[in-house]
Image (spheres, rainbow, N blue to C red):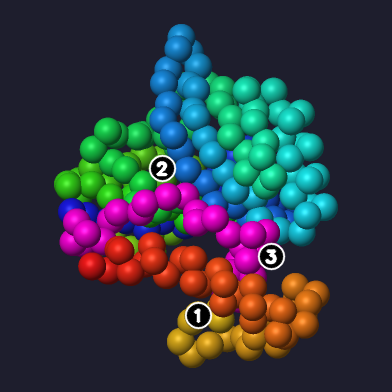
Amino acid sequence: MWVAKLKLKHDCTIGNRCEKFGVTSYSTSLGSYDKGKKNYTYQMHQIIGDAKKVGNFIADLRKDGRVKDLVVEGNTVMFVEERPAKRIPSSYYNKRLFFVKPVFVTMEGYEFWELASWDKKTLTDFIDGLEREGMKLEILKLSKAKVGDVYYPQIMPELTDNQKRAVELAVENGYYEIPRKIELKELAKMMGVSLPTFQEHLRKAEMKLMPNLSRKLK
């Protein structure tokens, strides 16, 4: 099995709004089909950030004519997006490709994709197609992996908004990197809560995330 991790930016209903409203997103595609000259993609996204910013994001999304059958539950949105066929990155989609993890979208509108295929050429052809499309693209990883390392069971565990926010801040600001780039007290200040409160949110989030990670490591 081959895995590619990509960082890219393109004209996107989610990425554009993450940049516009200062939020992040964990996203997954639930399948797509072509009808006539249109492509229809089923999508689910968890929008993470300040509650007001998330609300503004969703309100703006409702105005987008490409978004059909929008369903909103808290900060989770699900919809069908209508786009011209052959004018989107998924136009290069191959059924031998699949996403290993949900797509993470940053506040700057950059997307992190991690895809896998049995065949390296399937991945390289996909990447070549994105580059021909003019995407801002960086290959972060292209390597062989064990089959057990390419399974991701769900888009996100059941975390509260505060737990999601705590994890988001910790990841984005390098708390889990080596060497560590930021301390908990700084993250607590960024979130606008006390240090003990931030520690509690992060610890509870980690407790929910760890079972998924432990299953993946077996």
Labels 1, 3: front one: 3
Expressed as whole percent of the image width and height from the top left, the position of residue 140 reads 38, 64
Instruction: Report the amino acid beneath label 1.
Output: Tyr
Q: Which residue is mark 3?
A: 162
What is the number of the mark on residue 176? 1
Q: Which residue is mark 2?
A: 130
Circle 3 SS class: helix
Q: Earlier in the sequence, mark 3 or mark 2?
A: 2
20 or 165: nearer the eye? Answer: 165
Expressed as whole percent of the image width and height from the top left, the position of residue 155 reads 47, 50
The answer to whether residue 181 is left or right of residue 98 is right
Instruction: Report the amino acid beneath label 2.
Output: Leu
Quadrant that contains the N terminus:
bottom left
200 or 151: nearer the eye? Answer: 200
CA gap between label 2 and label 1 equals 30 Å
Which quarter of the picture shows residue 14? top right
Q: Are marks 3 and 2 in contact (CB under 8 Å)?
A: no
Please name the residue shown 78% across and 46% down the image.
Answer: 55
Circle 1 SS class: loop
Instruction: Report the amino acid beneath label 3.
Output: Asn
